[in-house]
Image (cartoon, rainbow, N blue to C red):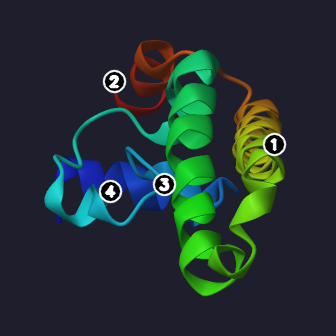
Amino acid sequence: MGKAEFIRLHLIEKGVPVDLTKPTIFVWPKYKDLSKKPLVFQSLVKVFLMDSLLLGPLWGAFMWVFSWHKEPEHWRFYLIGFALFGILMGFITIFRIIKARKSLGENNWENWCKRNYE
């Protein structure tokens, strides 16, 4: 077991949700360097933008393929809908990160590593 996996398990043991212990919330953490900062210690602005700009259009494309293409004249509402969905998902993730940080008692990755591993 590598150091990154040990840290991940330690965070889970401390009560951090599993998806917040990875470097990103999407599928590709398996293919990404897992030794990077867990999502719980990343910048809230970066996480919000990543969620908003990726989840909203992804959901919009999914909805277009399966439902919205039947009534294309309402495209303005669809754009507003997927933008609001992305913003909502960003805020939900930010709320979860803030809650996890409070349970850990630390906001800074370097300080947390020093306190727990040195």
Residue shown at 81% from the left, 58% from the top: 74
Residue shown at 71% from the left, 51% from the top: 82
What x and y, as percent, mark residue 84?
81, 42
Q: Is residue 61 visible?
A: yes
Task: Kindly report which numbered mark, 3 or 2, lies closer to the viewer in this rendering.
Answer: 3
Mark positioned earlier in the residue sequence (2 or 4): 4
Circle 1 is placed at which residue position? 84
Where on the picture, by quarter, is residue 117?
A: top left
Task: Kindly report which numbered mark, 1 or 2, lies closer to the viewer in this rendering.
Answer: 1
Residue shown at 42% from the left, 47% from the top: 24
Circle 3 is placed at which residue position? 25
Is label 1 in a helix, a strand or a loop? helix
Amino acid type assigned to the residue bearing label 4 in the image: Phe
Mark positioned earlier in the residue sequence (3 or 1): 3
> How far, Cα to Cα, is label 1 from label 2?
43 Å
In this rendering, position of residue 13 left or right of residue 42 = right
Is label 3 in a helix, a strand or a loop? loop
Decide which of 82, 89 is in the foreground and name it: 82
Is label 2 in a helix, a strand or a loop? loop
